[in-house]
Amino acid sequence: MTIALKIQNLTKQYDNGFQALKHIDLEVEEGDFFALLGPNGAGKSTTIGILCSLVRKTSGSVSIFGHDIDEDFSLAKKQIGVVPQEFNFSQFEPVEQIVISQAGYYGLPRALAVERTEKYLRQLGLWDKRHVAARMLSGGMKRRLMIARALIHEPKLLILDEPTAGVDIELRRSMWDFLRDINAKGTTIILTTHYLEEAESLCRNLAIIDQGQIIENSSVKNLLKTLNKETFLLDTLEAITQAPKINDYVLRKAEDHCLEVEVEKGQSLNQLFADLSEQGINVLSMRNKTNRLEELFVSLINKDKVSEVVA
Amino acid sequence: MSIQEQWIAFLTIVRKEVYRFMRIWMQTLLPPAITMSLYFVVFGSLIGSRIGPMEGFSYMEFVVPGLIMMSVITNSYSNVASSFYSAKFQNSVEEMLVSPMPNYIILLGYLVGGSLRGLAVGLIVTLMSMFFTDLNIHSLPVMIGIVLLAAILFSLMGFLNAVYANSFDDISIIPTFILAPLTYLGGVFYSINLLSGIWRDLSLLNPILYLVNAFRYGILGLSDIDVASAFIGVIIFVVLLFLYALRVLNVGQKLRN
């Protein structure tokens, strides 16, 4: 299997002395859909900044599809497309020009640049806006413009930093479908996100970074297996005055028509429903209180903080 | 990147820069045309007719080369300073920094873009001047050579100004407080032979004096300084500033974290 991204012993210390990355090692395989998760200020954007050369690393090495970013920077850069967190295009330029110019920076002949610009602007629903100055676009359109721009040289590795931040649900879902599609066609994708539902839904593998260190690196499936406990919300027909007491289950009243229950891994739910029914409570629907990955994420980040306090 | 790809990247920046100053021509091409016409009317026709000949030429003939050079200098400078700072301010400079194009292509692209604006304005001002006086060119190679060098030199300075600027104020401070005084005292309106002692010696430290006089030599065959030395001096400045600007880009100063 080809390695799309290999990070070895990567560190970054900013001029003010802040150590943003502390000896990070990471590998992402070709074709993967990979999530880089972590709280704010954990080092995600610094890592991405180093990959696309906007941030200078302090030490360590990074290679993209076998091309070292220092020794073979031109070939390494050709493999990457980046969609940054903040809008970083000229607000006054027309949409079409922004994308065509980006193609030019990668050395694409003009005819090909024009052809691909049409292709990606159409795919991302921006073709009708091609003559509009970028500042006139909505937030979601601006984000899609950055995706079109990042894909114009057809990179093998696409990096997205918070691609769906501030994007409405409908657009987020259509963006997910688009990303799934290009991943299925062979583009390796790395994304950072705050929406863990997004990571769970899209990604196969993930790394969690906290305080400049990778504290978890595994497949989403394996990580979810480690979840020992899930919290469910039960919507009830009857109004709840007090949480019922049922053996082996911890129940709490969440709202007037909603109960919260913690279920251990491997614990059956049949008995719970039977006992609730016996007590005259009819359950209308059931859902997870939070996204499963989110539960794990919070517990991992908190565990890290607790161990730091103890130390 | 192959040579052909680099050429495409270079042309992309140049095209973008030309498109930018053409799109906002009301801010870039029109004002210097109006300002310089006013100079021609006020200094050349109205006041100039009372000043009398300067070094054997009518005042209008004397002042035209200086005013053309002044337009080239200020417009080359301000084009790169405002365009590159604007790219930095909007973070759109990252579009270039993440791409595989080498830094010297970015630098050359902006230099040529800025120079083209300077030369375009220079051409407009030259055409305007023809309404007021006849231009007889003494040496075309000198005239073209020095105007190209001046455009590149001040594009380089504008680029460095943009890199180090932290606000839009910073890109107007140098043109207002350094460039304008040096230009006005750089022999555009008078021959330094009119000055005596220390003022003449101090004027010889002004780099713009050499550009104005070399350009005037190209048109009128008249110069206060040695034209060959002016060429050598300007070429040395261009090379040194180019290498410095390239180093700033390579290190990523003020551009990469």
Image (cartoon, coloured by chain):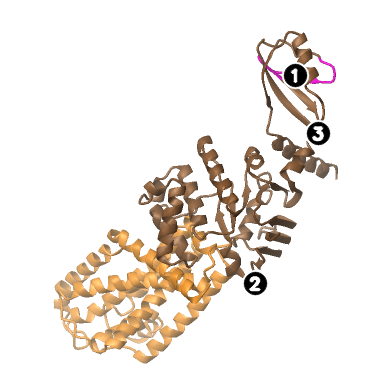
Chain colours: A brown, B orange
Q: In this orientation, which residue lies closer to the viewer: A19 or B106? A: B106
Q: Are marks 1 and 2 in contact (CB under 8 Å)?
A: no
User: Callout 2 environment at 10 Å: few (<14), some (14 to 19), or many (20+)?
Assistant: few
- Mark sitting earlier along the chain (3/2): 2
User: In 3D space, how far apart are the residues under numbered discs 1 and 2 (Cα atoms)?
Assistant: 59 Å
Does residue B177 appear in this view?
no
Q: Is residue B125 magenta?
A: no
Q: Which residue is mark 3?
A: A228
Q: Which residue is mark 2?
A: A71
Kind of residue sitting beneath label 3: Asn
* Numbered disc 1: secondary structure: strand
On the rendered image, what quadrant is the C terminus of chain B found in?
bottom right
* Above or below, A24 relative to A139: below
Q: Is residue B208 left or right of residue A215?
A: left
User: In 3D space, how far apart are the residues under numbered discs 3 and 2 (Cα atoms)?
Assistant: 46 Å
Q: Nearer the viewer, mark 3 or mark 1?
A: 3
The number of numbered discs placed on residues in the rendered structure image is: 3
- Mark sitting earlier along the chain (3/1): 3
Q: Which residue is mark 1?
A: A252
User: Residue at (56%, 43%) from the top-left corner?
Assistant: A176
Do discs 3 and 2 belong to a common subunit? yes
Question: Chain ID for label 2?
Answer: A
* Numbered disc 3: secondary structure: loop
Kind of residue sitting beneath label 1: Arg
Q: In this orientation, which residue lies closer to the viewer: B102 or B213? A: B102
User: Callout 1 environment at 10 Å: few (<14), some (14 to 19), or many (20+)?
Assistant: some
Q: Is residue A127 left or right of residue A305?
A: left
User: Residue at (70%, 47%) from the top-left corner?
Assistant: A206
Residue segment shown in magenta: A246-259
